[in-house]
Image (cartoon, grey):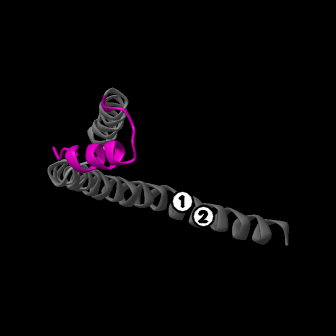
């Protein structure tokens, strides 16, 4: 983790006639805040790990999507297997009714 160069700010503060104890305290506060912010920053390793996890999840989703597409195709076939005979039967029934009623 990168650390802050404290000598230059210390020298700048003391050159501006800030007392030594106050300059050190101010630099310590700024350094602590900077370290707290750096703890929240993602590193390249964090990003690579995230990318690997996302790739893994996308691969899993692609497999599940392929399974889902297969199931949808089976349902379509099952629907057609039932609907086509029903339509043909209904058509035959209507034609028969029309012949009988003539």
Quarter of the image for the C terminus: give it: bottom right
Can you tell which quarter of the image residue 90 is in? bottom right
Camera-side residue of 66 and 15: 15
Q: Which residue in the rendered view is the most extreme toward the right?
A: 102
As for residue 13 lying within the magenta part, the answer is yes
Q: Which residue is mark 2?
A: 87
Residue 102 lies, with reference to residue 55, above or below; the image says below
- Residue 5 visible? The answer is no
Picture coordinates of residue 57 (x, y %)?
25, 49
Are the residues tagged 1 and 2 within 8 Å (C-beta)? yes
Picture coordinates of residue 23 (x, y %)?
34, 35
Camera-side residue of 88 and 10: 10
Q: Which residue is mark 1?
A: 83
52 left or right of 88 in image: left
Magenta residue span: 1-20
95 left or right of 85 in image: right
As for residue 78 lying within the magenta part, the answer is no
Q: In the image, what residue occupies the spot 22% across and 53% down?
A: 47
Find the distance from the CA under tag 1 to the CA under tag 2: 6 Å
- Check disc 1 and report its element: helix, strand or loop: helix
52 left or right of 81 in image: left
Q: In the image, what residue occupies the spot 40% across and 56% down?
A: 72
Q: Tell me the crowding category of disc 1: few under 14, some 14 to 19, or many 20 or more residues within 10 angstroms, Cα based.
A: few
- Check disc 2 and report its element: helix, strand or loop: helix
Camera-side residue of 12 and 34: 12
Q: Tell me the crowding category of disc 2: few under 14, some 14 to 19, or many 20 or more residues within 10 angstroms, Cα based.
A: few
Q: In the image, what residue occupies the spot 57% across and 58% down?
A: 86
Camera-side residue of 41 and 91: 41
């Amino acid at each position: 983790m990168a650390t802050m160069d404290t000598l230059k700010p210390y020298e700048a503060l003391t050159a501006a006639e800030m007392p030594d104890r106050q300059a050190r305290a101010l630099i310590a506060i700024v350094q602590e805040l900077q370290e707290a912010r750096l703890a929240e920053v993602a590193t390249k390793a964090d990003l690579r790990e995230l990318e690997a996890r996302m790739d893994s999840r996308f691969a899993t989703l692609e497999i599940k999507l392929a399974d889902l597409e297969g199931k949808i195709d089976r349902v379509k076939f099952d629907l057609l297997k039932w609907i086509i005979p029903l339509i043909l039967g209904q058509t035959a029934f209507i034609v028969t009714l029309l012949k009988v009623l003539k």
